[in-house]
Amino acid sequence: MAQQQARGRRSAETSAAVLVEAKLAPPQLSSRLLARPQLSSLLHAGLAQRLLSVTAPAGYGKTTALAQFVAQLEPLGITTAWLSLDAEDNDPLRFMRYLAAALHHADARLGRNTLAQADGGNMASLDALVTSLLHDLLGHDRRLMLVLDDFHLVQHEGLHRKLEWLIAHLPPNIGLVLASRTRLPLSVSQLRLRGELLELDAAHFGLGLDEAADFVGRVSGTPLDRAQQSRNLFLSGLDRSRTWFRYHHLFADYLRGRARELPGDAMRAVHLRASDWFHRHKLPHEAVRHAFEAHDLERAADLVASFSGELVQHRGEHATLLGWLTRLPQALVHARPKIRTGHAWSLVLTRRYPEAEQELRALEAACSDSGAVDDEGALRSVIEMIRCVYWAHTGEPLLAKSRSEAWLRSWPHADSFLTGVVANVLASGCCESDAFEQGIQALAVARRAFEECRADYGLAWASALAMMIAMRRGDQHEAMAQAKAGIAIVVRSLGVASYAGSMLTLLAAEVCYEQNDLAQAQRFIDQGLPFIDEHGLVEMTTAGYLTRARLLRLRGEHTAADACLLEGESLGHRLKLPRLSLILAAERCTLRLQAGAPDDALKLAQSYGLVARGADTAPLLAAADEDIVCLMRLRLRFAQGAGPGPGPFGALNDAIRRAQRDGHQGQLARLLALKAVQQHRTGDRAQALRTLDEALQLAAQLGLLRSLLDADALLLVMVETMAAGRDELEGATDTRVPLGYLQQLLQAAGRSVAGVRSAPPTPAGTMELTERELKILRLLKAGLGNRELAQSLFVSEATVKWHLHNIFAKLGVRNRTSALARAQENSLL
């Protein structure tokens, strides 16, 4: 959780400093270069292809030819993005950062969100970054060529596969040029068959007769004096300020060869000077690399310690840090706590939980040692912060809550970023333990802290956690208000196609599904899908898999829905997250029952202990209490064919009492609906309608639709009965469920409402306003402004504005004064 919140903390200056701008520009061209019309014609033919491959050994002039080609494209109105690759770009995150930077350098509309994600940390997966970049390119309306020079230096197979995927999905106006000394390590046979690939090799770089004659005429008799040599020493400028230069690879190889001939001390001094220069210019990879080359492990360890926080907390380059640690002796690592805290952070955020536990225990033991050096508890505060995040990520909400409370008491004046992280962890623990008001107060602390350090990722996390609290309470209206507020935050700085955006869109997809806005739910799922396996909190991953599978089921794609759930279930096993596997397995059972495969469903349910085997009594698993409705529905369905006996009805009543006690209003409405169905099946139809009336009154206030429709087919029949006022209803109950809500349920199920009488005209607002909206009206009457309202309700001002917008719409007014007047007329105050 904390990793993603770090992004907003780092300044733009720091972000810019770690990119070598010279890699983003082709070498400057000399006016004396030989014109290559034949080669130029071949390169221009590549404009009609999806991929242009240029392969030839070193010294054949690939870079120069491509630089000339790029210069010729500008007059044609074709934008070009250039990236010179090096061996360091085998780090996937670094590669994607530079690829996005190259596109952003060519057009400011491109790559911004990808750069924000890459700079944001661990949760920027390779899949997510490539998808984000493609999203930008699909929306680009101009012709663009992307040139990657020296591609042979990229040997990471994962990058090769992702580049293949990107090439396959590029729009027609985007072309890619790859220049390499060796054959491309990509699968391009399909492109070749479709005529979307142009391949140039060494044979195409030979001079034609006319070009050879031109070259000989130019150089024949030219004095090769030292000044001429110095001007053409395989060195070309990369910028107009003459700050950055590019060596030809052959010349670079020559210089390295000469360097190896130097005495050991002289070579070591060169590497140390280089390391110092890169350190001063905030280029950590190069600074550490040269320290290792100098065999100065003490210096390398000091550099890793100084860079580790920036590297893993702000940039998420966990693979880089872990790689460095394999080259450092343990004694040097253990003597530098900053390296070890960075290591622990990386292990938690890359879900290597057993190793993270081991490292955290070692750090905690070191802090307990009386001889440990700690600057006024700063080290301990960081270790304890990471521990809080660890408990939240490993599915231990009570431990996360208690440790976060202790942390906030122990370090009341800590760095605002750390405070915000821990306050968000506390809110997540409060959500899971039903301490809703405490959770809302914790989020207010987190928001103040993140606003102070301008960490938009932390603010987005606070909105996501506020959504989770509202959803757990069952308040879909509040959940959607929080989603909109959070999405507004990420849109302004990070983009919806980002990790921050995805955690909000995956949760918002579940809310939209519940409200039967299926088209919007699908859009949100599509936006969050690239990140679905990356989330630290299981609730977001669960929401994504469940909603995606349910949308597939509604479209009749049962096999795809089952495969989706199985994929998430396997993820839960792999990451040792039993709650995720359990909830998705229960949904798979329900899906199989709906598909008419009860034996398969029962076998799967018994394998997870969701239902009893034989005479055994399966307890309701505490790990899935938050999805008790799904489990109860499953057991009730299996109990239908089990013959006489008490079945799970006692457990159902217990679950209803717990939901009432804990304030789980949404859960309570769904459980009451299940109880009504069971009462109807046992013949007590009058009591069934009374129970259903209670359930639907609550559901109408909360905005529940789909979870009721998905519960049981019989429920819809009972709703039709209630809505139509048929004979079965007369005398059974004096229903207080708004008729408009019953009509909503029927329309959502695709049932005709022609035979259902229309809802009578009702004074505006008398049945539509939620409890939260009524509370806001009462506070408005007391004269509170938006800021005071936000403080009183422990929400953001954006959420208050959203509620006011809804209130005005429901009351049919345009301002506060009219809203209060209309509310007074209808006795709402």
Image (cartoon, rainbow, N blue to C red):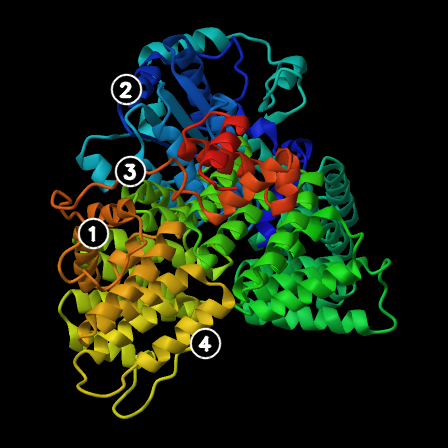
Residue designated by label 3: 168
Q: Nearer the viewer, residue 781 or 94?
A: 781
Q: CA distance from mark 3 to mark 2?
A: 20 Å
> Residue tagged by mark 1?
723
- The residue at 53%/50% (across/down) is 466
Structural crowding at the residue carrying mark 1, measured as other residues with C-alpha within 10 Å and reported as few (<14), some (14–19) or many (≥20): many
Disc with the residue nearer the chain's start (4 vs 3): 3
- Labels 1 and 2: the sequence-earlier one: 2
Q: Which mark's residue is nearer the viewer, 3 or 2? A: 3
Circle nearer the N terminus (2, 4): 2
Label 4 environment density (alpha carbons within 10 Å; few <14, some 14–19, many ≥20): few
Structural crowding at the residue carrying mark 2, measured as other residues with C-alpha within 10 Å and reported as few (<14), some (14–19) or many (≥20):
few
Q: Position of residue 609 (x, y in %)?
A: 34, 81
Up the image or down, 65 lies above or below 479; here it is above
Disc 4 target residue: 622
Numbered disc in front, either 4 or 3: 4
Q: Nearer the viewer, residue 495 or 190?
A: 495
Which residue matches tag 2? Answer: 45
Q: Are marks 2 and 4 in contact (CB under 8 Å)?
A: no
Q: Secondary structure at mark 3?
A: helix
Check the image and report above or below for 797 versus 174. Answer: below
Looking at the image, residue 780 lies above or below residue 574: above
In front here: 148 or 319?
319
Element at label 2: helix
Q: CA distance from mark 2 to mark 4?
A: 65 Å
Rounded to the nearest angstrom, the CA distance separating label 3 from label 1 is 52 Å
Whichever of labels 1 and 4 marks the residue nearer the N terminus, that label is 4
| Secondary structure of the residue carrying numbered label 1 | helix
Looking at the image, which is closer to me, 734 or 631?
734
